[in-house]
Image: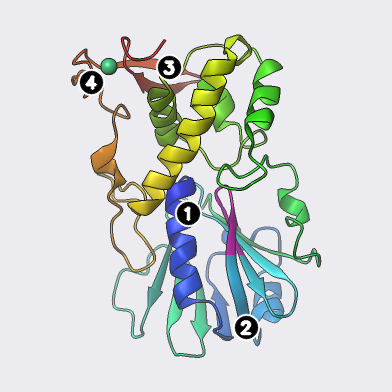
Amino acid sequence: MPELPEVETLRRGLEHHFSRRRIVDVEIIGSRTVRRHASEEVPQLLVGSTVSKCGRHGKYLIVFLDSGIRMVIHLRMTGRLEIVTPPFLGDIKHLHARFRLDDDRELLFFDPRTFGEIFISTTKDADQLPDELASLGPDPLSEDFTLEHLAKVCKKRNAAIKSLLLDQNMIAGIGNIYGDEICYEAGVLPTKRASQLTDGELAKLYKATGQILLKAVERKGSTLSDKKYLDITGSEGQYQKHHRVYAKVGTPCTCCGNLILRVKISGRSSYYCPYCQK
Ligand SMILES: [Zn+2]
């Protein structure tokens, strides 16, 4: 699933290609993608509007329209956005939505597993998150994500720190890859109880969160061997080459040479170095 760095890379691509463009036509092919609406409602709400900017909160893309409403996109497991110049000759088997722009290009939304979602939020206060996203925690690259916030949510929780990092209602945007990389960078075992973290460990974890996510954004996110994540022009991210622990079970730690181990946390594989992480 795309995490914050991949979604931020897409946001930058959307900002470049989609902002200031007028939407001249919308075709909804997969009604499940717009499941909060009747399919015909989506074109009615969007056609004729101009995109003013493209934002993001956690793993959600938020497209601001000059009419004051916002289009929210979540890719979930297999959603993918691509900007194309018609005629599009690629595979349209899993094409669920098509947005035609006033420069004759099209933004396409593909989603083989159909967990992804597009919805229109009519919350008018553009400074507020759309109502539908109100339960999300702060975005870790925003000013709202502070050491105090991290310490507060950790103190109350007995769960493994990795689980807490992945809890979107506590912090929005981290998933399985970056959760492991952040714990490694901080030198903290992913299984460590959140409430047991010392002030020093919390400070390291807070710093590592920003550092890892920013480095991954710089390298346009991670494209794994399944190639599920590609940027808006169809290019691969590069941060997978810089993973230190994720999916590296049995290979030597680049810092100490001990073998990377795997443990299940909340049913998901987590990777760590038994020497560098305490
Ligand atoms: Zn190590």
Query: For the residue marked with disc 4, what is the amino acid?
Result: Cys
Left or right of 76 on screen, residue 151: right
Observer-nearest of 5 and 198: 198
Question: Residue 34 is drawn in which quadrant?
Answer: bottom right
Q: CA distance from mark 4 to mark 2?
A: 49 Å
Residue tagged by mark 3?
A: 264
Q: CA distance from mark 1 to mark 2?
A: 22 Å
Which callout, 4 or 1, points at the residue further toward the start of the chain?
1
Which callout, 1 or 3, points at the residue further toward the start of the chain?
1
Query: For the residue marked with disc 2, what is the amino acid?
Result: Thr
Residue tagged by mark 1?
A: 7
Q: CA distance from mark 3 to mark 2?
A: 46 Å
Which span of residues is magenta-colored? 55-62
Question: Residue 256 is drawn in which quadrant?
Answer: top left
Secondary structure of the residue carrying numbered label 3: strand
Observer-nearest of 186 and 70: 186
Which callout, 3 or 2, points at the residue further toward the start of the chain?
2
Mark 4 sits near ligand 1, with its Cβ under 8 Å away? yes
